[in-house]
Amino acid sequence: NQEFSYETALNDLDRARLDLLNTLDLPRNTMITPIEETDLSPVYPDIDLCLETAFKNRSDYLNGLITVERAKINLLLAQDNMLWNLDFSSRVSTARNNLENSPDSDTYDWEVGLMLEIPLYGDLSRKQTLLSAQTSLKQAELALDEIKQNITIEVQDAVREVTTRLKQVGMAE
């Protein structure tokens, strides 16, 4: 059993050496020998810092945030479409008379108006759009919460795994 573990450890060491050589773009037959021994003190990961980093860099979480913001904007637009709309309009036009020496050779035409648009009670399309926007926002928020939970679980598992490995290394020394 110890011989098997020893062979497995040698195999893992050789695989790590080859991965390092591949990363450094060195020939595969290069042998790496440490020149001096370094004192590596264990660094235990901070769960809060790891979570903060994960939330800043995970594309699924960032896409979820964008989806929630987009749903909020769509809801705001749907709510705005339910309100009354009062528009102001104006127009000025000029017309030139043929009498050139007349002091009133130009005539101006002025128009000013207000237009009030009131959503009717029977218009269900606006209400359906509002309900659809509310539903989309709730779905986006639920999806974001699920993504948060998954990321939190993944980070906690990774931190626990690192802590366990550091303890194993400490026991092996």
Image (cartoon, rainbow, N blue to C red):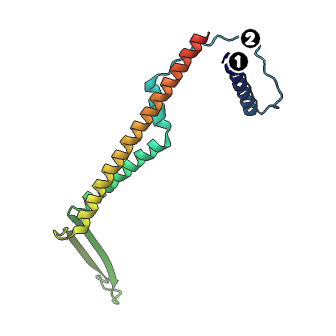
Element type at mark 1: helix
Give whichever of 84, 103 is nearer the camera: 84
Horizontal relation, residue 4 to residue 103: left or right:
right
Cβ atoms under marks 2 and 1 closer than 8 Å: no
Q: Position of residue 63 (x, y in %)?
A: 45, 47
Comparing labels 2 and 1, the label whose residue is closer to the camera: 1
Quadrant of the drawing holding the N terminus: top right
Q: Does residue 104 appear left or right of residue 29 in this picture? A: left
Of 74 and 131, the residue lying toward us = 131
Which residue is the site of mark 1? 3
Q: Position of residue 111 (x, y in %)?
A: 25, 76
Q: Is residue 103 above or below residue 132?
A: below
Q: Amino acid at mark 1?
A: Glu
Is residue 55 shown above or below 80? above
Res. 2 image quadrant: top right
Q: Residue at x 26, y 68 (%)?
A: 125
What is the secondary structure assignment of the residue under circle 2? Answer: loop
Please give the residue where the numbered disc 2 appears in the rendered image.
36
**In the rendered image, is residue 72 in sight?**
no
Q: Quadrant of residue 150?
A: top left
Instruction: Count residues near mark 2 (Cα–Cα under 10 Å), then give few for <14, some for 14-19, many for 20+.
Output: few
172 horizontally vs 102: left or right: right
Which quadrant of the figure contains the C terminus? top right
- Which residue is pictured at 22% across the width and 72% down the height? 113
Residue lying at the far left in this picture: please name it: 121
The foreground one among 71 and 101 is: 71
Looking at the image, which residue is at 80% across and 31% down? Answer: 26
Residue appearing at x 55%, y 17% in the figure = 166
Residue 124 in the image, given as x and y percentages of width and height = 22, 68
Mark drawn on residue 162: none
Q: Nearer the viewer, residue 89 or 115?
A: 115
The mark that comes first in sequence, 2 or 1, is 1
